[in-house]
Amino acid sequence: MLKKFAGVRRLIAAGAVLLAAVSLQPLSTAQAAPSPVVGGTRAAQGEFPFMVRLSMGCGGTLYTQQIVLTAAHCVSGSGPNTSITATAGVVDLRSPSAITVRSTYVLQAPGYNGTGKDWALIKLAQPINLPTLNIATTTAYNTGTFTVAGWGAAREGGAQQRYLLKANVPYVSDAVCQQAYGSSLVPGEELCAGNVQNGGVDTCQGDSGGPMFRRDAAGAWIQVGIVSWGQGCARPGYPGVYTEVSTFAAQIASAASTL
Ligand code: ARG
């Protein structure tokens, strides 16, 4: 969805499936055959152990074993909240070995108003004994090739996925991203990625809140983005837009310390 349709974007938090129906666009058969995220493949069990699926239809990551980092637009505000279920430890959401834990509290980014600042923290009732994902605290890793993963639609207007999908997306500069989105992009708070030339690979509805990550200098995964928005999915000329995690790293850390 184009960001200027802020109302529509908020709908995604309410129901990714509903949104997918609203955003249904005919795909030309001449377009690159989209398969799993869009243009991705199935993740292996245990490949991204920090990945979380949230019951409102979003992704997230284990920031700590008891705090999930997701997108602000996936939640409706801050305060005690026991309505969200986090599913972790599986690529198959229907696996009997899935770990499910309820939320106790939601902290939406202070000052979030639908433009930028698209991050939130969800406190879980119990810790989940799985690896966490470190977040970027400087801009050092905000370029290169990124990995994205999620259970969202595998094509624009498509269904949510049972199995976790992954794809690689190249960094897109703010200048190029602004050619697509103009002043809707908040360059200091958002980071773009995707195949601008040909499209075909992207996150999509239901991937929101999930991570965009890469390897750091030590070879460990580090989160640089949070799936936020885009015009359609995987369209040429329209990269995906991600929360620039490094911008908010200090705020995220201090917010987490209060939970
Ligand atoms: N806002 C969407 C969600 O709630 C994510 C859209 C990402 N779009 C994109 N073209 N990268 O799931």
Image (cartoon, rainbow, N blue to C red):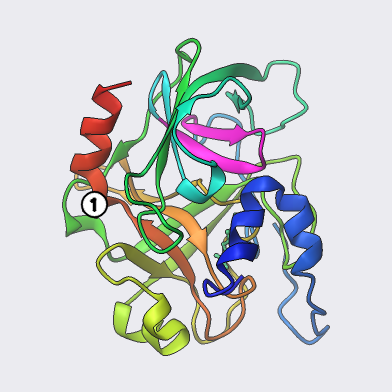
- Residue 191 falls left or right of residue 153: left
Q: Which of 86 and 200 is in front in this view?
A: 86
Q: In screen coordinates, is 147 left or right of 32?
A: left
Choose top left, top right, bottom left or bottom right for residue 9: bottom right
Percent position of residue 153, x then y: 71, 56
Is 118 located above or below residue 235 in the figure?
Answer: above
Q: Residue at x 61, y 27 (%)?
A: 84
Magenta segment: 49-62
Task: Pick the quarter of the image with the N terminus.
Answer: bottom right
**Disc 1 C-beta below 8 A from ligand 1:** no
Residue 37 falls left or right of residue 106: right
- In reply to whether residue 59 is colored magenta, the answer given is yes
Residue 49 x %, y %: 49, 29
Q: In which quarter of the image is the C terminus?
A: top left
Q: Residue at x 63, y 61 (%)?
A: 204
For label 1, the SS is: helix
- Ligand 1 is found in which quarter of the picture? bottom right
Q: Is residue 220 above or below residue 217?
A: above
Q: In this view, does 110 lie above or below 158?
A: above
The answer to whether residue 218 is visible is no
| Mark 1 nearby-residue class (10 Å; few <14, some 14–19, many ≥20) | many
Disc 1: which residue: 246
Of the residues shown, which amino acid type is indicated by label 1?
Ser
Seen from the viewer's position, the closer of residues 100 and 9 is: 9
Question: For the stretch drawn in magenta, what is the main secondary structure?
Answer: strand
| Number of dots carrying numbers | 1
Q: Residue 127 appears at what percent x and percent y?
A: 45, 12
Q: Position of residue 255 (x, y in %)?
A: 27, 32
> Was residue 200 drawn as part of the magenta stretch in this picture?
no
Residue at 59% in and 47% down? 150
Picture quarter containing residue 164?
top right
The one nearer the camera, 63 or 188, is 188
